[in-house]
Amino acid sequence: MGFRTNPDRILENIDRDRSRREEESAGYERQATGRELDTDVPDSDATTSERVKRVFRAVERAYVKAAQRDALGALAARFQSIGDIPHHHARGDVSVQVRYLDASRREDVGMAPFEVTPDEIQEARKESGTSRADVNALRVLRLKLRSGVMSAYQKVEPRVRDAVRDRADLGHVEVQVTADLRPAR
């Protein structure tokens, strides 16, 4: 039976589309975002490594904002909702975006995928001593966010070094760290 004639697949797609629309209208968050604007212009005699460290410090500050309870907690709370993330299994991406606001250079973006498995939630449950799914998920998501930010930054670092050589970082620099979470299918 093909896709068009299989009633189970048709109903499944309708349910998935309906739940996606309900989720959007209810205001469920799929992303935790931290944004940092660095307005301190480096000295004209600053070395390349000092200027790259400036961008990395902005990435660290954006990561801290994304990892806070109010930003990441909304994603972790989805693990507690019945049927929202089935069997505590989810996939996501961490992205690091660097924008040079006073230069004509395009933004640099690095992404790193991650996956949250039920085994990781169980390990976090053993460590924390609580059975609350949102608390354990928050612990796992913070670890995934940290490793994802480091991995994404390593991907974008050569382009940041090129931007520093092109002197694109001598103005304002904005960094955005985003963790996107979706149920695994």
Image (cartoon, rainbow, N blue to C red):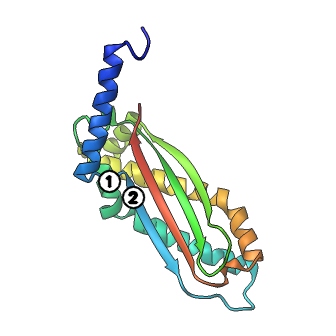
Q: Which residue is mark 1?
A: 29
The quadrant where residue 72 appears: bottom left
Q: CA distance from mark 2 to mark 1?
A: 8 Å
Question: Which amino acid type corresponds to the residue marked 1 in the rendered image?
Answer: Glu
Mark 2 element type:
strand
The quadrant where residue 169 appears: bottom right
Question: Which amino acid type corresponds to the residue marked 2 in the rendered image?
Answer: Ala
Q: Is residue 46 left or right of residue 62?
A: right
Mark 1 element type:
loop
- Vertical placement of 124 versus 176: above or below? above
Residue drawn at the location 31% of the way across and 15% of the way down:
7
Q: From the top left corner, tell me how far across and down residue 174 is, in percent.
A: 54, 74
Label at residue 32: 2
Does the rendering let one see residue 128? no
Residue drawn at the location 50% of the way across and 66% of the way down:
176
Residue extending furthest front?
A: 4
- Vertical placement of 71 versus 20: above or below? below
Q: Are marks 2 and 1 in contact (CB under 8 Å)?
A: yes
The quadrant where residue 89 appears: top left
Q: Nearer the viewer, mark 2 or mark 1?
A: 1
Q: From the top left corner, tell me how far across and down residue 14 is, in percent.
A: 30, 29
Residue extending furthest bottom?
A: 44
**Camera-side residue: 145 or 39?**
39
